[in-house]
Image (cartoon, helix red, strand yellow):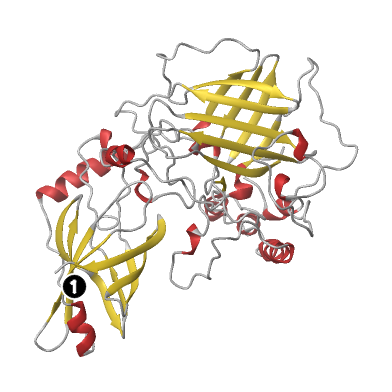
Amino acid sequence: MQTIRSAMRYALVGAATSFVAVAHAQINDSIRGAPSEANHFIETPKGWKQPMTPWGEPDIQATLDMMQASGVPLERCANSYRPGAPACDMNKKWLTEEEYKQRVEAAASRGDRSKQLASEGKFGPALLAGLVDPNIPQRQTNLIVDPPNGLLPPLTAAAKKLAYKMGSDWALPGENINFQSAADFDSWDRCVTRGLPSMMMPYRYNGGFKIEQAPGYVVFNVEMIHEARVIPTDGRKPLDSNIKQYLGESRGHWEGTTLVVETTNFRTEPTVNQPLINLAVVGSPAGNRFPISDKLKTTERIVRLNDSTWLYEIKTEDPDILTAPFTVRYPMRNNPSYIFPEYACHEDNQIVHNYVTTNRYERAHPKPEPPQPPVKASEDVASLLAGVWVGTPKIPTIDVNIEIEFTKNKDGTVNGKLIGTNLGKIDKPLRNFRIDGRQIDFTFPNVDPWNVSAKLTDNGTIEGIVFSIQGGTTVTFKRQR
């Protein structure tokens, strides 16, 4: 927890007027110096020296704040798939210096809502307002720095089959979820772990990350779920490959003053149900169905750039799941005043139990969907729409084929319904169905409302975006009959 104004003290540090052609493939000591893409435009002052511990190792101890980058989506342009969102350039990796300064000034002018409410004696609302830690505008446009296109690499065919078997309380577009037991929820839902690499990426709150050291050890202590990773750096042999753990087995070593941590031996049995990336990371794939295999390996690098800023990187590879590795990188600043409150996720947690019991009741006592009024449309649009359409939202982890049907009535009006998806049948009328010229908008009548905003094209397709609280993506519907 922190204030926006104190966060802004660091925001303009490292603003630069020039770009370098190509960023380093991985961070290390050599990136220190003048602001550049390689160090995310964060300067290391001339003459600055890396502090050392009393026992002679690089001192990287800090109370870091992941929330600095919580407004940066995982994939490039992932925040642009909403009505009214500004156009996004898929080739733009960095904001210009002027764009960056404008965003910093705008963020500073917002003030601290939590502090303001507390000064008015409204301590309850002040606490709630402070649960969402403020982020700071960043020069980078997304967290993934490799592949260069800023997108997750495609999943293997085997991975997409595994994704269908994963449980989650986040519905995909057009999907209804049946909760039978706690096994239908992922590891974060059950307060077990966010897992790697997700736990090392920013969310909307609880983004504290404390680094502590002792001779031969570095400890990564993360605020969310209060998970501590004890990482030996003394060169000891790894554990037997048969010994698996939720967060794998980590071994660290120093390359100059850069800490490198390699982690393997992850638990992968179905009961773990731990997504590779989950919705705790803004701009991640919808539905939390992101499988892992026993070949998962992460390689983290963290380097101290100056007295206030650390640069963190994590490379993820899993050849059974991903067709190529991907690397996330972002800066974190040291904030000694950051507060680590109790993360009471599991104590008296009734959410999973309530989801299961209420869902069982709803399935035993189904309620019919209220009828939706027919929608007026021009003769040509009504005729073009009439029929069954199938669309597959662009979700990298799982293929969801959504089937909808439009019916042209005798008076020229149109009704629409969701037939269902390849994950299950629904057969309910579309909600909030509207037609304006060739613009078509509606909401799927499923457990986690997804909205569609699209246009009927001259090519005979319906093209647009599908979005919800989870985020958004593109979708194209094609007529089947």
The residue located at (18%, 58%) in the rendering is 420
Quadrant (top left/top right/bottom left/bottom right) for the N terminus: top right
Where does the image place residue 281, in percent across and percent down from the top left? Answer: 49, 46
Where does the image place residue 468, in percent across and percent down from the top left? Answer: 37, 60
Quadrant (top left/top right/bottom left/bottom right) for the C terminus: bottom left
The disc labelled 1 sits on which kind of residue?
Gly
The residue located at (67%, 51%) in the rendering is 3
The residue located at (32%, 47%) in the rendering is 398
> Looking at the image, how many numbered discs can be counted on the residues?
1
Residue at the right extreme of this rendering: 47
Compare residues 40 and 1 and report the one nearer the observer: 40
Q: Is residue 123 above or below residue 89?
A: above
What is the quadrant of residue 112 in the picture?
A: bottom right
**For this view, does 42 lie left or right of residue 348?**
right
Where does the image place residue 218, in percent across and percent down from the top left? Answer: 65, 22
Q: Is residue 12 above or below residue 34?
A: below
Residue assigned mark 1: 416
Compare residues 193 and 273 and report the one nearer the observer: 273
Mark 1 closeness class: few <14, some 14–19, many ≥20 residues within 10 Å: many
